[in-house]
Amino acid sequence: MIIKGIAEKTSEEASLEYFNSRPRGSRLGAWASEQSSVISSRDFLEKRLEALEQEYEGKEIPKPPYWGGYKVIPSEFEFWQGRPNRLHDRIYFTKESNSNWKIDRLAP
């Protein structure tokens, strides 16, 4: 799948609202794991989570300063499904000015 469009960083307020709506374990996990950073082992993550569970026992969990999101406003989608003999299915959606979606089948 390919998506083309505009990505906008979510506001601090929207990020905080979403962070606070997540389960407690997920909020602790956001502190335990800085996404995509290199770690030594799975054990490192589990020990870090354990320490955070103790640190925040009975307390509110603040949103990490690096935690947030992006809102994608799509203008195009392409769905690709592999088929035998290179006759793949490619379905292409394009947003039209009237907010409707045009659907085309593309040759592989």
Image: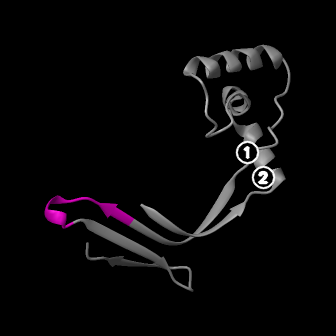
Colour setup of the view: one colour
For the residue pair 50 and 75, the one nearer the viewer reads as 50
Mark 1–mark 2 CB contact (< 8 Å): yes
Q: Which x, y percent locates residue 73?
A: 61, 68
Could you tell me how far apart the alpha carbons at marks 1 and 2 are, in whole angstroms? 6 Å
Residue plotted at (56% across, 86% down): 97
The amino acid pointed to by label 1 is: Tyr
The quadrant where residue 63 appears: top right
- Label annotation for residue 18: 1
Residue plotted at (73% across, 48% down): 68
Quick one: which residue is furthest to the left in this view? Answer: 85
- Label annotation for residue 14: 2
Q: Secondary structure at mark 2?
A: helix
Left or right: 62 with respect to 86? Answer: right
Left or right: 51 with respect to 78? Answer: right
Q: Is residue 22 above or below residue 71?
A: above
Left or right: 66 with respect to 73? Answer: right
The amino acid pointed to by label 2 is: Ala
Does residue 63 show up? yes
Q: Quadrant of the N terminus?
A: bottom left
Q: Write the start and end of the magenta stretch as one range.
A: 79-87
